[in-house]
Image (spheres, rainbow, N blue to C red):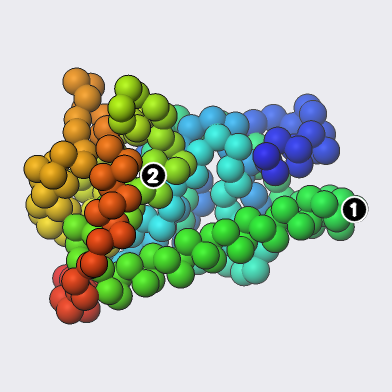
Amino acid sequence: MFRGRFCDLLRPDRPAKTFEPDEVLYESGDDERCFFFLRSGVVKIGTIARDGREIVYDLRKERDVVGELCALHEVRRDRAVALTRVVAMVVPFDEVAEMLAKHVVMLREFIGIFCGALSEAYERIDSLAFDSVVHRTANVLQSLVKKFGRPMGNFIELPIYLTQEELAQMVVARRERVSTALNSLRRQQIIHYSPRGHLRLDVRKLNQYRLSDAPINVEVASVLRR
């Protein structure tokens, strides 16, 4: 992984910083240009909409990089908040840039991080434009399975606990509509709940549902305005 190999090149005695759940790593508008290399925990990346609603772009976990957009903008355009207890190595942008200039292989992988994030952003835009809330919910669950899923019998379990409000922030829809979407997926036996409240997914059925014809979401504009 990029983070592991890159951090091996940095000072081994660099202290890590700990963030408690709901603690902000950086806020939109901050001008401190630095990267966060996650040693443990989960961080949510997003923004606050004009109407005050929180929107979550992505979740990052151990061995991921957070704050990479500081390479493009001197002022933060997104925000990062600890979803769980997080331990991260904080590295200034100038130091990262200097290290990448010396190691071409790492530079290529770093560019890959940007391209991956851009690809996911395109997929999210397509989903917002054309998919119903239930299909958008299924797409978000699929992305969570790829990042966090662990086998649990015939299912894949998400070991992190996400509230319906947090899922709604990722789907970009009201919590009530995401709750209805989850109930629909549950009736189709696509999702189940463990005794501890974790989501378990039948990935085969989830993929079949996601690939089925999704009705164009003509209400998306009004959803985003609410």
Q: CA distance from mark 2 to mark 1?
A: 34 Å
Residue at left offset 32%, top offset 41%: 203
Q: Nearer the viewer, residue 12 or 149?
A: 149
Residue for point 38% across, 71% down: 125
Residue 56 figure quarter = bottom left
Q: Cβ–Cβ below 8 Å for labels 2 and 1? A: no
**Residue bearing the label numbered 1:** 102
Query: Residue 40: horizontal and vertical position, in percent?
Result: 54, 30
182 up-or-down from 119: above or below: above
Split into 4 quadrants, where in the image is the C terminus? bottom left
* Observer able to see residue 95: no
Rendered image quadrant of residue 4: top right
Residue at x 34%, y 32% (from the top left corner): 156
Residue closest to the eye, 195 or 175: 195
As drawn, 67 above or below 5: below
Label number found at residue 144: 2
Q: Assess disc 2: are there few (<14), some (14-19) or many (≥20) residues with their C-alpha within 10 Å of its C-alpha.
A: some
Residue drawn 85% across the image and 55% down it:
104
Q: Is residue 47 found left or right of 15 in the rendered image? A: left
Location of residue 108 in the rendering, given as x and y in whole percent from the top left corner: 76, 57
> Which label sits in the foreground, 2 or 1?
2
Secondary structure under tag 2 reads: helix
Neighbours of disc 1 within 10 Å: few (<14), some (14-19), many (20+): few
Q: Amino acid at mark 1?
A: Lys
The N terminus: image quadrant: top right
Sequence order check, earlier mark of 2 and 1: 1
Foreground: 222 or 210?
210
> Which amino acid does the dot numbered 2 rest on?
Leu
Q: Quadrant of residue 83?
A: top left
In the figure, is residue 59 to the left or right of 224?
Answer: right
